[in-house]
Image (cartoon, grey):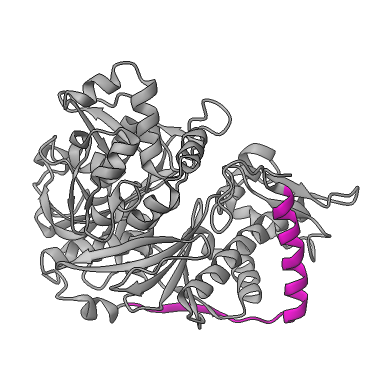
Amino acid sequence: MKNKYILALDQGTTSSRAILFDYNGNIKNKRQKEFNQIFPQAGWVEHDPLEIWETQISVASDTINGFDKNDIVSIGIANQRETTILWDRSDGNPIYNAIVWQDRRTADIAEQLKTDGHEHFFKSKTGLLINPYFSATKIKWILQNVEGARKKAQEGRLAFGTVDSWLVWNLTEGKHHITDVTNASRTLLFNIHDLSWDDDLLEILDIPRSILPKVCSSSEIYGKSAKRWMGAEIPIGGIAGDQHAALFGQNCTQAGMAKNTYGTGCFMLMNTGNKPITSKNNLLTTIAWQINNKVEYAIEGSVFIGGAIVQWLRDGLGIIKSSSEIEKVALSVGDTNGVYLVPAFSGLGAPHWDPHAKGIILGLTRGTNRGHIARAALESIAYQSLDLLKAMESDSKIRMTQLRVDGGACVNNFLMQFQTDLIRVPLIRPQTIETTALGAAYLAGLSVGFWKNKEEISLQWRSERKFHPVKAKNEMESLYLGWQNAVEISKSKN
């Protein structure tokens, strides 16, 4: 087994990636392809499901090209969560574009559910808040607005899936319509206590049970990929939503351990062990993973716009030519000169949960230049993450002693240093920052005996760099007060 490989498919919000790992968790090969972001109108975000599939299978094939296909013992899948796809079971064609987790079109549906008094009921069963972020309101919107969708669903002709389900359906040529507990727990339809789709919630939302996938654990053999895709029938052995996969890849397998992923959004998760913790600070209770019939839980805070702010500076404002340029431009000034940027392009996530908040840039003067705006953009990622950490410590009653970091933006040393100065605890960046893909690989490897257990996997985790606070605490607290003021201005009530 030690001379074999695990293929991880990391299907993200802006790109599809594939990484081949060996027994020691080393990357042997990888490929990545971006795909189109579709914005039909303000607040709407869509993807073409066929393009998701085409880019994902393309990078998977390219990644294993030149390797003996029989040496690839399992496939693991990590995926953007909550993104919603409905397709026709007969031909596998989507009936509408994928509605992305960032999409806000169902804000009115969510508000009506809250007005009708359902929020506590949903939270008690799912651990989630009623918000357009999650899959259920997106499903409801498609059934209401796509011609013929409701009739097909009632006749059992439609399948719903988050992106993991969509990939497995295509990999197995329609033989398996499944998801795992982590993705199911993000739909607003899944009871995280008894681990089943909830009939009461389905009835409230008027969603037919027949469209839902079978829910499996995060590490088991679900089926095999068809030979036509990669030249061999390879077991599919692990599935987890991207943030759960990253938590596992960061070896946060003990209660109290936490990580923050700096990707398109930012996602901070803390392992809370075998019991769910109900948040009093608008965080989410979610399933971390299920392995060998043992379920572990986590609390999570989500920042909708993290690294995506850098893309906006590049593509929207044009003040940088490439994402890698952002750190240099930010460091061209000593501070933001009083500028704050609140990137509420898709509303505000935890702990505010305001889907109607709007992005703002505050504190502009004639002396403001692109360096100040670039720096304010990076600082906004750190401020939003501090909001999460404060809520998480309050809920868990655990004082965090370190925070493990990953995701594309964690390579930005300025951002990491500013973050540690804000939160006042060390940040640890691992040698392998591809922790999402690595977590999916670990889950897939466990199911086929590639690794024996979590303890064997834990020996592989290595730190690449630790960041420690250097700026004065009172200086950082003053800056944070300015941020809190800017957030209040951005909220819908203003």
Q: Position of residue 484 (x, y in %)?
A: 71, 61
Q: Position of residue 369 (x, y in %)?
A: 82, 50
465 drawn magenta: yes
257 drawn magenta: no
Q: Which of the 4 image quarters holds residue 359?
A: top right
Q: Which of the 4 image quarters holds residue 440?
A: bottom left
Q: Is 464 above or below relative to 407?
A: below
Q: Is residue 199 left or right of residue 343?
A: left
Residue lying furthest front: 117
Q: Residue at horizontal 33%, vertical 26%?
A: 143
Q: Is 107 above or below relative to 72?
A: above
Residue 168 in view of the camera:
yes
Q: Residue at horizontal 79%, vertical 64%?
A: 335
Q: Which of the 4 image quarters holds residue 458?
A: bottom left
Q: Quadrant of the C terminus?
A: top right
Q: Position of residue 11 (x, y in %)?
A: 34, 47
Numbered range of the magenta stretch? 461-489
